[in-house]
Image (cartoon, rainbow, N blue to C red):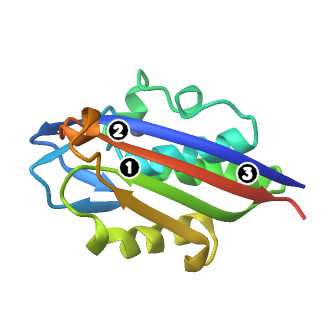
Amino acid sequence: MFRIGFGNDIHQLISGKPLILGGVEIPADKGAFGHSDADALLHAITDAILGALALGDIGAHFSDEDARWKDADSFVFLKHTVELMKEKGFRIVNVDSTISLEKPKLRPYIDKMRENLAQVLEIEFDCVSVKAKTGESLDAVGEERAIKAETVVLLDNS
Ligand SMILES: [Zn+2]
């Protein structure tokens, strides 16, 4: 049986915070504000896998009111979710994500993100797609106030 999942995430961009995406720290004027390390890509992928399994959302599993997750490495959330998925007998077929960020350009960092994700998701590099686009100077992304990530994931239990 196949299951499809969708996840998205948004974080405010502020000065003095690191910008971490897919576990890669990206040199930038502004970073993402959040309770954990605010890795929007990992949060969207975590939500997509939980969604495919109808297990609720990332906030239900990792509350931002829980001191354990303050400044947490978001790979902890994703690894835990992958374990839940495996307990249910599923594996990931492929993941496709889009990050929306006005600047800097993410192209130099994309393959490192894909490598990190392939390892945690236990799939091949070419089954992990990460795309990047700007907000075309429109909306919160375009005004450099926010970073967004959106993901779809396909699971299989055969
Ligand atoms: Zn988030």
Please report the residue visible at 20 percent of the width from the left and 35 percent of the height from the top: 145
Please report the residue visible at 18 percent of the width from the left and 37 percent of the height from the top: 143
Among the 4 quarters of the image, the one containing residue 125: bottom right
Is label 2's Cβ within 8 Å of ligand 1?
yes
In this view, the residue farthest toward the top is 65
Residue in the foreground of this view, choosing between 74 and 118:
118
**Dot 1 alpha-carbon crowd within 10 angstroms: few under 14, some 14 to 19, many 20 or more:** some
In the picture, which quadrant includes the N terminus? bottom right
Amino acid type shown at disc 3: Met
Residue in the foreground of this view, choosing between 63 and 24:
24
Q: Position of residue 9 (x, y in %)?
A: 44, 38
Amino acid type shown at disc 1: Asp
Q: Determine which of the numbered discs, if any, sits on residue 73 in the image.
A: 1
In the picture, which quadrant includes the C terminus? bottom right
Q: Tell me the element at label 3.
A: helix
Residue in the foreground of this view, choosing between 91 and 5:
5
Please report the residue visible at 55 percent of the width from the left and 65 percent of the height from the top: 120
Q: CA distance from mark 2 to mark 1?
A: 7 Å
Residue in the foreground of this view, choosing between 67 and 78:
78
Instruction: Please say whether residue 33 is visible from this viewpoint.
Output: no
Q: Position of residue 55 (x, y in %)?
A: 72, 34
Tell me if label 2 and label 1 are in contact, CB under 8 Å.
yes
Residue bearing the label numbered 2: 36
| Horizontal side, residue 87 vs residue 137: left or right | right
Label located before the other in sequence (3 or 2): 2
Q: Tell me the element at label 2.
A: loop
Amino acid type shown at disc 2: Ser
Residue bearing the label numbered 3: 85
Is 135 located above or below residue 143 in the figure? below
Q: Position of residue 74 (x, y in %)?
A: 42, 48
